Amino acid sequence: MKRKVWVSSPVFYLITLAMLGMAIASWFWNPIVFYIELGVCVAAIAAVLIATRNFHFYVKHIVQGARKTLAGREYQMIQRLSLPLVMVGENRDIVWGNEAFLKAMGWSNDYHGVSVAKLIAPYTLEQVMESSGTEITVGSHSYTVFASRTESGYVLYWIDDTAYKDLLREYAETRPIVAVACFDNRDDLLRDASGSEDARICSEVETTLSEWAHSMGGFMRKLSGGNRFLLFTDERNIMEAKKKRFEVLDRIRAIKTADNRSATVSVGIGRGASNFAESELWARQALDMALGRGGDQVAIKQHSDDYEFFGGLSKGVEKRDKVRTRVIAASLSDHIRASDVVLIMGHKFSDLDAVGSAIGMWSAAYKGLKRPAYVVVNRSQTLAGALLHNMEDALEDGDEAIFISPSEALTLITPKTLLIVTDTHSPDFVESQDVLEEVSRVVVIDHHRMMVKHITNAIVFYHEPYASSASEMVAELVQYIGNYALGRLEAEALMAGIMLDTKGFVMKCGVRTFDAAAYLRRRGADTVQVKRLFADSIETYKAKFRLVSAAEVHGNCAVASASEETANMRVVAAQAADELLAIQGVMVSFVIFPAGDHIGISARSLGDVNVQLIMEAMGGGGHLTMAGVQLPKTTIKEAKAQLLKVLEETLPKATKFPSVNTSRV
């Protein structure tokens, strides 16, 4: 009880007395001023006395109303009831409380006029009335407050359930949690290491994980295979680890080989499961998700499809072993042979990688395995129109069409139809969701980091986040499906897809990327012809550099905005984002642009920043160095404000970026 309604405070009596003293003093100075001040003083005293009388009458009326309702003995019982009870007037002020309430609040009898809002904040009295129990904390005690309406005010009942809530919190915080950790780059890190170096690195990784488990009050056991570990801890310690952003990832990353390469681990955590078996299952699923997103991160699965991710700052390590590719190719060949028609499609607003990889699979199915095959593409939205024209111009009279629309594809679907989805694994991003839903046999070939919502009914899910592009993956598969299935045009289509996603063999290139390019070159791919597929019109070129010249730099981030939509806006935005990375000091770039009834953001980085995490925070996705998002029902200004807010929240946690200072490029 720190503040009352003003009429009940003795302070105002003191003020009126001071005014009276000033009036008396003014008599010796100016009689006119004396009479004026005396009149004001008398009026003030009268107002305070009347208001005080009214307030006491108001309190007395409410208390008497309660006493009329209850017999004298019943009133005394409520007064001595162990359940805290308080009466509140129409003005939301406390007018009466029983002994238990006064004791719980630590108050004396002088409590009239205290606003009940002080006790029930941040809730209002109306919210307490409408709820079936509101949790309120006063000091170290927790109460569940119930309210009821009376003729002259409100009655609030305070149930002290501190002990039960403490018990519930202790139960929740000590719930056991299962985690599975994987030394995800062990094979590549220690491929050429000596036996002693291998033992040292593995020992340091295992020791660090064991110390982390013990610091959380749990323990760790190594699983068969040598690079996986099972950890047990509880909810309280996992929440503490979340607050520290799982610093164990940084400690593992500090373990380096003789040639200064860092070890990385991925951790899957099953949180909130009903039993150990379910928690272990969720932990393994979370670990698969973490590895599918490139590794070096922690994934927490909390419900059926609810994931949280931490880390993921390192570049993916290339897998040099092609055994899995050969196995996938053999399985894919069997499925193609068992199909009456093969449909291949990429993602919405298909680019050279989506169309190029689709053409590669079309060639493997149609030319290599002699099965009817078609590429499903929306011509009005594709960004690879030049590639489509090249393929169609090469068709001779009597040849079947290569490209069909989604509506045409729906007429060809039978129970034996096979659908191959390339360059995406999200059901929301495919060229046609209707086709995906109609076909029962689906194959996925993609290189983007795993998204929580992905195609789950695929009979073959070939996902390599370490690959540079879907075209690289298809180029490897084709060699095992039919080495001579690719012609010059198909090889150039795949080469164009690789060049697009690697920015001309600059970004995310590994040994296998150049192996695939060398194979395509042997199959007749002409790099000059491929380069022509990237040619822009003069209008597109001007629009691109208008965006670049108007860009702003925030720390190490470049942000550009397009005020209006132009032809090939998506291509322009993507190219502008690439160009911004050429500016000195810029490590990550974003281009905001209108795209129909949406606002799009195209994000690029040099690999030091994971733009996938940034775009996922805004509802999008993508890859480590290339990502994007579409924002419905928003404006360019709102999208930019949202992006800058996410950058301020995300980048300081990911890398050591300077404070946001805006300057013109």
Image (cartoon, rainbow, N blue to C red):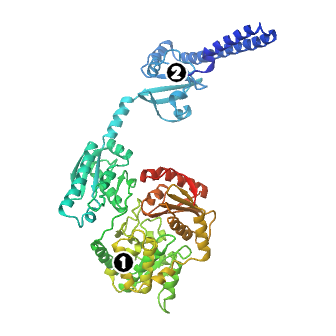
Q: Within the image, what quadrant is residue 468 found in? A: bottom left
User: Does residue 231 appear to the left or right of 631 in the view shown?
Assistant: left
**In the rendered image, the vertical position of residue 518 relative to residue 617, given as above or below:** below
Can you tell which quarter of the image residue 215 is in? top left
Kindly check if marks 1 and 2 are in contact, taking CB atoms under 8 A apart as contact: no
Question: Does label 1 or label 2 sit earlier along the sequence?
Answer: 2
Please, which residue is most extreme toward the right here? 32
Horizontal and vertical percent position of residue 430: 47, 69
Q: Nearer the viewer, residue 104 or 440?
A: 104
Q: Position of residue 17 (x, y in %)?
A: 67, 10
What residue does disc 2 label? 1
Q: Amino acid at mark 1?
A: Ala
Residue situated furthest bottom in the rendering: 397
Q: Position of residue 139 (x, y in %)?
A: 44, 27
Which amino acid is tagged 2?
Answer: Met
| Gap between marks 1 and 2 measured at Cα | 77 Å
**SS for dot 1:** helix
Q: In the picture shown, does residue 62 fall above or below 294?
A: above
Viewer-nearest residue: 40 or 368: 40
Given residues 538 and 135, the one toward you in this image is: 538
Q: Which residue is mark 1?
A: 516
